[in-house]
Amino acid sequence: MLNDLFITIAAGTYHMNFDWTDMTASMHKVGMSLVSLLAASVLATQPADAAGIKRIDSGSTEIFVAFDGLVEGASTFTLAGPDRIAIDVRGGQAGRGGRASGIVKAVRQGQFDPQTARIVFDLKQPAIVTGGQFSADGKSLRLKLKPVSGVAGTGVRKNFLPPAQFRAEPPKNTYSVKVPLGRPKDSVKLPKISGPDDPERPLVVIDAGHGGHDPGAISPHGNQREKDVTLAIAKAIRDRLVDSGRVRVALTRETDKFLVLEERYGIARRLGADLFISLHADAAGNEEASGATVYTLSEVASDREASKLAARENKSNIINGVNLGGANREVSSILIDLTQRETMNVSADFAKLLHREGRRKMPFRNNPHRFASFVVLKAPDTPSVLFEAGYLTNRNDAAFLSSLDGRARVADGVATAIETHFARKLAQR
């Protein structure tokens, strides 16, 4: 993973070195001119005139994609387990959904990186793209689809370009900015493990989101801060698990402490955790939005809301405008390697279990299991979920999550799911 941001101004290049967690007071005194330059350079990398995806039709023999402007080109590739076909549109801006029919059972869209929209077609059976082309005006793409028996070859890309005179120009970056950040430090002190003194017992690591200079969401109904709410819930879950004595548990933070995103799941990996849960309490523009949601990792967010939420949470490493999250293609838009499939499947199974057990104790949203590319879920070998316990912007949710009874109910639901999950794993052995 690359953790650098780059800024070049005129003929000079300016470098600033920051440690991941040992940020001194001087960091907070960075001049506004530097912050402005950083902001301008980051904005310069965004596609100002990306063409939006306005229509998708798909069936058993053809895929049709229409744009509201010009794109640079597109490439397709096939994935198995489950069977999917993906299209990367360079110079495109993702919309949502699309019409599915025939062997295509669902269509999803997401922003793979600032310059690339990704469309994923979930298939009822394996299929391949045999050909295709852009329209004469460059504003639509038609692909030929062929169902096949057995397993379709995966990973092979087919590239398609619009006519040269109707091809969008690649974005031109005026600035190149570099702020070497290094990697998350292994010197971050590991937390204590509570529960049975038995290394054979499964270990769950619970991560209270945000902390320190990063308050997270702030409720307009009592000014509860997400960092305080998540820490209180994390401690309640730990205490509930310790009381039962079935599993071991550790918290990534037990105080009002800031950790960068990679250090959070890094702690779980270094401890050899069997499960990682990141706790959050979201904010929404609509104060009526309420209920809990469980997110697991996917190469494409399940909806626009999930994509925006992941983008916001993935930038939690920002101090004075300097993004410590390594907001570059390799980190923020990584396509999960197929070797992570088993970990993702276990995570998804636990998400369903968390909803089943938790809904007896707390309210959940409709469609409670969603997918997004959260940084904290990217440990390749640790089953992980991000649990949004509710919305601090909702009066009832904020009151529930801030009360002793509410926290106890959340803790009981989560702890029961954890214990059931590991009991299943033991039975499978």
Image (cartoon, rainbow, N blue to C red):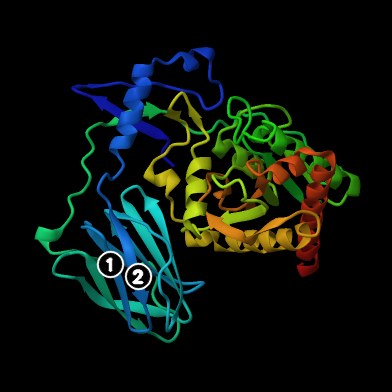
Q: Is residue 48 visible?
A: yes
Q: Is residue 383 visible?
A: no
Image quadrant containing the C terminus: bottom right
Residue under the image location 38 percent in, 59 percent down: 95
- 346 to 405, vertically: above or below: below
Residue 119 in the image: state x and y as whole percent. 38, 64
In the rendered image, the residue lying farthest to the left is 165
Badge 1 marks a residue whose secondary structure is strand
Residue 238 in the image: state x and y as whole percent. 80, 42
Number of numbered tags placed on the structure image: 2
Residue under the image location 26 percent in, 26 percent down: 8
Dot 1 or dot 2, earlier in sequence: 2
Three-letter amino acid code at disc 2? Ile
Left or right placement of residue 129 versus residue 373 in this view: left
Few, some or many C-alpha atoms within 10 Å of disc 2 (few <14, some 14-19, many ≥20)? many
Q: Which residue is mark 1?
A: 66
Residue under the image location 44 percent in, 45 percent down: 332
Q: Which residue is mark 2?
A: 56
Three-letter amino acid code at disc 1? Ala
Residue under the image location 32 percent in, 63 percent down: 54
Residue 368 in the image: state x and y as whole percent. 64, 60
Badge 2 marks a residue whose secondary structure is strand
Please say if the residues under marks 1 and 2 sit with CB atoms less than 8 Å apart. Answer: yes
Instruction: Decide which of 181, 289 is in the foreground and name it.
Output: 289
